[in-house]
Image: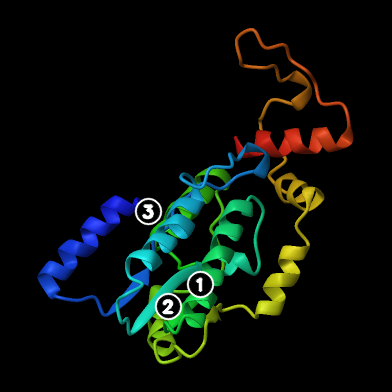
Amino acid sequence: ADEVSLASAIATTKAEFSEINGVIHCAATENRGPVSLKKPDIHHGEFSAKVRGTRNLMNLLQKDNLDFFILSSSISSISPGSGDTEYCSSNACVDAFSQLLQSRGVPALSINWERWRDVGMAQAYEKLLAEKTGAEFSGGMSAATGVKAFGYMMNGLHFEQIAMSTVPINEMISQANKIDIDYIADLFSQRSSSDSRTPLSELRSGLVGEEYVPAKSDHEMRVAQIWQDVL
């Protein structure tokens, strides 16, 4: 995402291959979580690679006659999940960049990928889920399916945006619309009744000099319960 480093990499590439004919942007960073914990800083977090990096690529290659400019977006910009505020919005920006490039005559395409099973960022997320809950992540597509789909999409550069999902888009949007504090709390409440975690009523602050303030409202109790389950 750093413009100076990117300019240097582009110069090195052109020195070796004389020109750049196309771009496939797949960079991303992981920084999911509640929006209340986010900082409005475009230079860090998930906006860095997706927004700043894409913009820098566009500026540095604007005089190049590119055959294609492929942007790897996510289905999350269409059907976000819990804790996906930053990820959803950064990928929505990627979708908008594709439209901007197309308006400038650049054959651009933003691909809203569903999760690739056992690949990249998804692999770490699936491992974390298994460690925390003992459950396996369902859904997603195989790497072979993704590669095959990508081949088809490269022949569809007259589109500015394509969603790739093994689940009908309408179903994914409907599922995303169900997500709220009650939905998340219900998911965690489905854990085994043999769970030996400390009851919320017995928890105390682990910060030195920090006075413990118990949850009072039903809403606060639900939020506290979710964080206990996560942590």
Query: Do the residues under discs 1 and 2 have CB atoms within 8 angstroms?
Result: yes
Judge left or right: residue 143 versus residue 194. Answer: left
Q: Quadrant of residue 227?
A: top right
Q: Which residue: 23% across, 64% down?
A: 10
Name the residue tied to disc 1.
113
Q: Amino acid at mark 3?
A: Ala
Q: Quadrant of residue 224?
A: top right
Residue 55 seen in the current view: yes
Mark 2 Cα within 10 Å, few/some/many (few <14, many 20+)? some
Question: Is label 2 in a helix, a strand or a loop?
Answer: helix
Q: Amino acid at mark 1?
A: Trp
Query: Quick one: label 1 or label 3, which is nearer the N terminus?
Result: 3
Instruction: Name the colour scheme.
Output: rainbow
* Residue 146, position as x, y percentages in the image: 42, 78
Residue 195 seen in the current view: no
Mark 3 Cα within 10 Å, few/some/many (few <14, many 20+)? many
Query: Quick one: label 1 or label 2, which is nearer the N terminus?
Result: 1
Q: Which residue: 52% across, 87% down?
A: 159
* Residue 97, position as x, y percentages in the image: 51, 70
Name the residue tied to disc 2.
146
Vertical position of residue 82 compared to residue 22: above or below: above
Q: Amino acid at mark 2?
A: Gly
Question: Is label 1 in a helix, a strand or a loop?
Answer: strand
- Outermost residue toward the right? 217
Q: Which residue: 45% across, 91% down?
A: 156
Name the residue tied to disc 3.
1
Mark 1 Cα within 10 Å, few/some/many (few <14, many 20+)? many
Count numbered badges in the picture. Answer: 3
Question: Is label 3 in a helix, a strand or a loop?
Answer: loop
